[in-house]
Image (spheres, grey):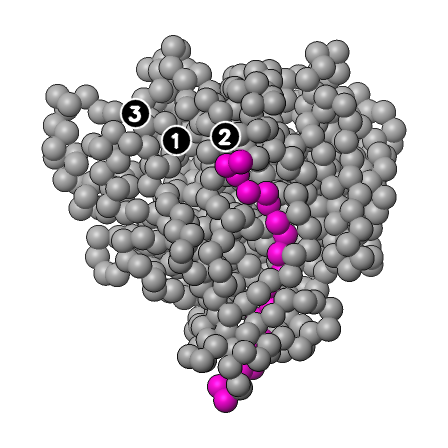
Amino acid sequence: MSQSLIGKNGTESPEPVKAEVTGCVPEWLQGTLLRNGPGLFNVGATEYNHWFDGMALIHSFTFKDGEVYYRSKFLRSDTFKKNTQANKIVVSEFGTMIYPDPCKNIFSKAFSYLLAAIPDFTDNNLINIIRYGEDYYASSEVNYMNQIDPMTLDVIGKMNYRNHIALNMATAHPHYDDEGNTYNMGTALMRFGMPNYVIFKVPVNASDKEHKKPALRKVKQVCNIPIRSTLFPSYFHSFGMTENYIIFVEQPFKLDILRLATAIFRRVTWASCLKYDKEDITLIHLIDKKTGKAVSTKFYTDALVVFHHINAYEDDGHVVFDMITYKDGNLYEMFYFANLRKETQEFIESNKVNISPPICQRFVLPLTVDKDTSNGTNLVRLKDTTAKAVMQSDGSLYCLPETIFQGLELPGMNYKFNGKKYRYFYGSRVEWTPHPNKIGKVDIVTRKYIEWTEKDCYPSEPVFVASPGAVEEDDGVILTSVVSLNPKKSPFMLVLNAKTFEEIARASIDASIHLDLHGHFIPTQSTN
């Protein structure tokens, strides 16, 4: 693999850099695309073990009147400040554990960790950008977030979910409904009461106009879901949402809580606390958004691992949801630097053996279930899918998915169709490399696939932005930031026609751009 793409410290461009545009950026494209990802991997003489551990580097691409402006800043988290002040890594990350000095009262610290059931995590929020109310937060999967100014990328303040709702972890992939309310999900592993998965909502009007009070002060709990195995909660990275339901997949990729609480003292990483039980089942919880009550039918499927849901919707008495699944829990292993730095061929061969490919699968849950239905009957009545939900003797439904496409990750779609019946999704092509060099579009109805690729170029997760007044689902553009192995080729923002994947424009940027994970497009508010 290329050292110029992985493990190399990114650099900041704190002042806006005007890009050189070739082609024509649509005049209607007005707004800022915020992106987040790991960007600092070495501090002094110390180095992280894993790509997902790198300190967050946030960058933005602002589209204004056919021009593009770029800026980037390291997230000034407490973790960033402590590490840079010490000139070495002093805060543990998921795959890099910093062991305490045994002289510094290690036993009282161990006792307090065990009491809390889970350690105090880093606030290095490197995964995504979340909107709560009108506030924007750099987020990862822990209880801390950092609020940022989306224009300057400066940190406004640090936020702790636990000050507002009992959570130890929350996803970095929330949902936004048509009104602008934000729904998210977390895990409560507090020292009092039974552990639960928690679904919560932050209303669209939660922001304080003077920015003195956090939007999370208006958080409302939608429901609790009991954890199937108290000491082994399911890991989850995202969830599904329709107009009326939340879909939570309780997968057999689990967190060992006792191991997590004692990881520092066992001298193991937090990442080693995740275990995949391929002999277990995957439970699918369907929760009514309005009542917070779970549908009584037990839905389950075979063991699988999922990180990203694509979309979900209701159709003629069924809930349909699509997600990217794996047959094992080894994806995280791919991103250890020890693995990434293998020669390309060795890397490809080892990962072909060890890591299953991502598969887009469709699951269908019938909402009306007659308990007298004979054993073995498929209750899915929809004509446009081969997915099944088969009645079992105990009244549960065993779900058999339909495979839609293999080989795409980091899925995106026209978010106006979130929770509604849809036809297209976009993603990064995964071909045994952690750094995809293709992005693609799948037509779920026809199963046609188109892609964009260019030699030595590595595009980020594709982001769809709809044309003004668009009726057709794919009427709009795809945005992706592209870095190149070729030193003569500047990084650039690529604008594609979402229908055809033909290039409309590219904005070349005279600055260092890093590979990232996820982002959020903020349209410029019209003054009309």
Q: Residue 11: x percent and y percent? A: 56, 17
Q: Secondary structure at mark 1?
A: loop
Q: Secondary structure at mark 3?
A: loop
Q: Secondary structure at mark 2?
A: helix
- Stretch of the chain drawn in magenta: 353-372
Mark 2 closeness class: few <14, some 14–19, many ≥20 residues within 10 Å? many
Picture residue at 85% right of the left edge, 44% below the top: 500
Is residue 356 within the magenta segment? yes
Q: Along the line of sight, which residue is nearer the eye, 443 or 12? A: 443
Vertical order, 284 against 251 (above or below): below
Q: For residue 112, which quarter of the picture? A: top left
- Residue 202 visible? The answer is no
- Residue 408 visible? The answer is yes
Q: Which residue is mark 1?
A: 95
Furthest residue in direction bottom, as rendered: 372
Is residue 325 within the magenta segment? no
Gap between marks 1 and 3, in whole Å?
10 Å
Q: Is residue 112 left or right of residue 13?
A: left
**Residue 335: image tag:** 2
Check disc 3 and give the amino acid type. Ile
Q: Which residue is mark 3?
A: 98
Q: Is residue 36 left or right of residue 259?
A: right
Vertical order, 143 against 375 (above or below): above
Q: Residue 150: x percent and y percent? A: 58, 36
Q: Nearer the viewer, mark 3 or mark 2?
A: 2
Gap between marks 1 and 2, in whole Å?
10 Å
Q: How many marks?
A: 3
